[in-house]
Structure formats: C-alpha cells, structure tokens
Image: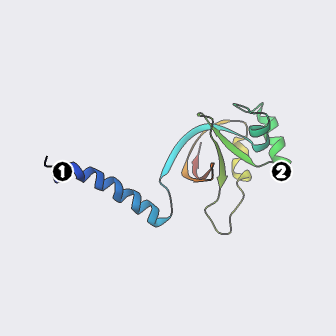
Amino acid sequence: MRLHLSFFFPILLLLAGGVSNAANGKPAGITLHGYVLDSACAFTKDLQKPISEKCARQCAQAGSPLVVLSDDGEIYWPISEKTPAEGQNGRLMPFAGKKVTITGRVYSRAGSKAIAIQKIE
C-alpha cells in the first residue's frame, strides 16, 4: 500500500496551525452566545438565565463577579489579557442580565473557562 504526500498534506497543515497558536501563547478567537449574570447565582442557583437585569446588576454592584453563561451551559469567566489585569465588571455592567454575543479568546485550565473579550454586543 502506497500513500501519497497529498494524503498527509492536510494533516501537516492542521498540526502546523496548532503549533503556531501554541507558540504565540494566545488561543484562536471564538464567538459565543449567552447571558451575563453574576457568578454566585450561576453556581448556587444553577440558573439557565438571569432572574432579571435588576438582580444581576445589584449582585454585581455588591461585588459578585459577572460571568457569561453560554447557550450550551458553560460558564466563562471574563478576564483581561493586560498586565496588570483589569476587572471586567465595569465593562459588562451595561449587559448584566441580558443575552449577548461575545467574541474573544478562550483560555481553559483545570475545568474552568475564561474569555478575554474583544467584542460584546
């Protein structure tokens, strides 16, 4: 059985793309859809969406970090890629309790997911 180089070329391209992303330290961007809500309610109340915009804002104003609960049930912690890092509640407050579309880079570690938001609408 003889395999041609054309068989391996697509595989090599995929591997090279993965290596280049790992080399620059930044994952590729994604777009996700979901709700902005406070982290306490996302975990303790197992909500599928915020109770209300008012509730999400009050919890955030009291210090609870806002998170993004995606349509597939994943929770994403909004993070800053800057050093020193900046909190993201101020940026997310206008969207608290609302359905959003977010574009950004996703980082994963030990089962947690974080998103460095590039665009939110």
Which residue is at a point 83% across and 50% down the rendered structure image? 63
Query: In the structure shown, which secondary structural element does the residue marked by tag 2 occupy?
Result: loop
Which residue position is annotated with label 2? Answer: 63
Q: Is 118 drawn above or below residue 47 in the view shown?
A: below
Instruction: Find residue 70 and report its image quarter.
Output: top right
Query: In the structure shown, which secondary structural element does the residue marked by tag 1 occupy?
Result: helix
Which residue is at a point 69% across and 41% down the rendered structure image? 95
**Considering the image in quadrants, where does the C terminus appear?**
top right
**Mark toward the start of the polypeptide (1 vs 2):** 1
Q: Where in the figure is residue 36, as x and y percent of width and height?
A: 69, 40
Give left or right: position of 91 versus 23: right
Which residue position is annotated with label 1? Answer: 6
Q: Is 55 drawn above or below residue 120 in the view shown?
A: above
Which residue is at a point 83% across and 43% down the rendered structure image? 59
**Residue furthest out toward the front:** 1
How busy is the neighbourhood of tag 1: few (under 14 within 10 Å), some, or many (20 plus)?
A: few
Q: Amino acid at mark 2?
A: Gly
Q: Residue 19 bears which disc, if any? A: none
Q: Amino acid at mark 1?
A: Ser
**Residue furthest out toward the left:** 2
